[in-house]
């Protein structure tokens, strides 16, 4: 089974549905465009760092593989771009995602960059604790899949690409 690094700390029900019902996902095109614009702006703002696009990578574990591509790389660092303002609900998952990408790339430094009205940059050093937090999330997701148990959701349905499927309620069957 393959899990995307970018799923880390999402609503676990969302990740579960992403595995089994990818064709039922409905993307909000405005959010996708917002993310692309943020990456384009970051590319311009941080061009002095000689950034380049990341490549697809994989991390192999006993029960699953993590796949992903960091937004940008420099010789020394991984750069992960987020659109909007930084808030706790975005910073922690972003830092864990960044650390998983640092592990994939063999880099000890990362920048979590929020592009919005004002650009905010969070400098990070590689943290095995953050990687372990990410692994705990994916291990729990794997357990739900193995048992065939749909995980409880989180109250973030307003921007969820599967809200039309679960409606914020427990999905009885797939």
Image (spheres, grey):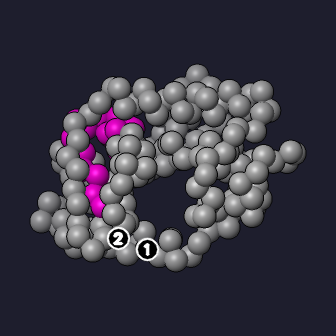
Q: Position of residue 75 (x, y in %)?
A: 18, 48
Relative to 12, 103 lies left or right: left
Image location of residue 80, percent across then percent down:
33, 54
Q: Is residue 65 visible?
A: yes
* Residue found at x 23% / y 50%: 122
The residue indicated by pointer 2 is 38
Query: In front: 90, or 30?
Result: 90
Which part of the image, by quadrant, shows the N terminus? Answer: top right
Q: Is residue 21 visible?
A: no
Q: Residue furthest top?
A: 62
Seen at 65% across and 49% down, the residue is 14
Disc 1 to disc 2: CB gap under 8 Å: yes
Question: Could you tell me how far apart the alpha carbons at marks 1 and 2 are, in whole angstroms?
Answer: 6 Å
* Residue positioned 23% across, 70% down in the render: 118
* Residue 82 in the image, given as x and y percentages of width and height: 37, 60
Residue 88, numbered circle: none
- Give the labeled residue for mark 1: 34
**Magenta span contains residue 101:** yes
Give the x, y percent position of residue 129: 35, 26
Q: Quadrant of residue 107?
A: top left
Which residue range is magenta in the image? Answer: 98-114
- Along the line of sight, the residue nearer the viewer: 8 or 64: 8
């Amino acid at each position: 089974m393959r899990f995307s690094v970018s799923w880390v700390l999402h609503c676990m029900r969302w990740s579960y549905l992403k595995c089994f019902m990818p064709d039922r996902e409905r993307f909000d095109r405005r959010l996708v465009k917002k993310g692309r614009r943020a990456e384009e702006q970051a590319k311009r703002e941080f061009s002095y760092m000689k950034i380049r696009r990341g490549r697809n990578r994989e991390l192999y574990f006993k029960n699953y593989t993590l796949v992903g591509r960091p937004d940008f790389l420099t010789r020394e660092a991984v750069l992960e771009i987020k659109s909007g303002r930084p808030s706790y609900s975005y910073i922690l998952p972003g830092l864990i995602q960044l650390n998983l990408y640092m592990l994939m790339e063999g880099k000890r430094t990362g920048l979590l960059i929020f592009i919005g009205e004002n650009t905010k940059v969070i400098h990070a050093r590689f943290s095995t604790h953050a990687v372990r937090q990410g692994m705990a999330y994916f291990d729990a997701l794997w357990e739900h899949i193995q048992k065939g148990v749909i995980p409880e959701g989180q109250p973030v349905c307003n921007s969820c690409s599967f809200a039309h499927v679960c409606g914020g309620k427990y999905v009885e069957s797939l």
